Image (cartoon, rainbow, N blue to C red):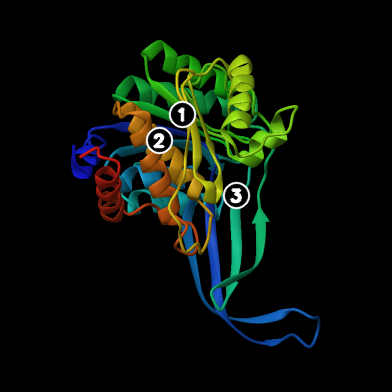
Amino acid sequence: MTAREILQKFENQNILIVGDVMLDRYLTGTVSRISPEAPVPVVLHRATEDRLGGAANVALNIRALGATPVLCTVVGQDAEGQALRRMLPENGMTDSGLVLSETRRTTVKTRVLGNNQQMLRIDQEDDHDLSKAEENILLERVVSLLNNTSVQAIILQDYNKGVLTPAVIDAVLSAARQRGILTAVDPKKHNFFAFRGADLFKPNLKEIRDSVPFQVQADLDSLQQAANFLHKKLEHSITMITLSEKGLFLENQKEARLYPTVPRNVADVSGAGDTVISVAALGLAAGLTLPVVAALSNLAGGQVCEYPGVVPVQRDILEAELDHWLLENKYA
């Protein structure tokens, strides 16, 4: 099977993404001097750009890979929330799953870049849990979307900003089980062990180290020990642990392997996790083997790290790199 044939398996999939969204705002300029007021660089502002971030970046990746994303989340009824609402259709996505709240601010991460280097990040956010009323509205929207759309996978994308409360997590996973829909989780620390019964659980190494009661190293035996611990807690099916430049660990309780990545000219690791969960969920929903899912995840996650800022994967580049991997590993 060629890379093109593999990626074509993504094209008829509808993927529901539930989680925290944000605006990634970039203030770019040049630096030529140090401020006389304090020992800090002076950035001469040249441009401002807003990009879709968090779970919205997952949706961008899903669309870039040829599938149809449906994003379900809660944002503020503020200028930034309205901007997000406009940006979804502008990027070829529906805003039907967007819930506007009068009591929350939309999360905005503002990065100041001088001479193509990040100098400062300013975060604007409300990260408390949704109210019960907001939970109910969000879950009604999720159920409505599931009842009216043929969904092949649900991605729960957690950034600890309050959308994925324990009640929301439990209800979404229960709805998925009732309908036989694959679930993929990109967790964060606050509700790390709330995603019981998911199909794919994808933390990174730091999140594992912060959450298990023993030391974890980036080797097969240590990562398998961590995966065993997670299985007892979560009763999930597949564990993927991303290891930055060392690749990833992937296991399904029958087989476990470390999959190294290829060397990259890394410009920015922001958003790489969004890309990996997107590719992995699509691959598993399409019935791809674990080695191919791992290869796609490594290649796609590495690709987006070569570009500054949060960007979605480029399918044509991924296809070419996957063809090379298939030949090298005698899959063709």
Which structural element holds mark 3?
loop
For label 2, count other residues whose C-alpha is less than 10 Å away and answer few (under 14), some (14-19) or many (20+): many
Estimate the x, y position of residue 249 in percent, counting from the top left. 51, 35
Which amino acid is tagged 3?
A: Thr
Could you say whether the residue bearing mark 1 is in a helix, strand or loop? strand
Image disc number at residue 243:
none
**Residue at the spot of label 3:** 107
Residue 56: x, y in percent?
A: 45, 45
- Between 205 and 329, the residue placed more toward the observer is 329
Above or below residue 69? Residue 46 is: below
**Residue under numbered circle 1:** 184
Please state which of the two labelled residues, at mark 3 or mark 2, is closer to the viewer: 2
**Residue 287 placed where, x, y %?**
30, 26
User: Residue 181, located in which quarter of the rendered image?
Assistant: top left
- Real-space CA distance between mark 3 and mark 2, rounded to the nearest whole angstrom: 26 Å
Q: Is residue 228 left or right of residue 9?
A: right
Q: Are marks 2 and 1 in contact (CB under 8 Å)?
A: yes
Tell me whether circle 3 and circle 1 mark residues in contact (CB < 8 Å).
no
For label 2, the residue is: 280
Tell me if I can see residue 146 in this picture.
Answer: yes
Q: What residue type is labelled 2?
A: Ala
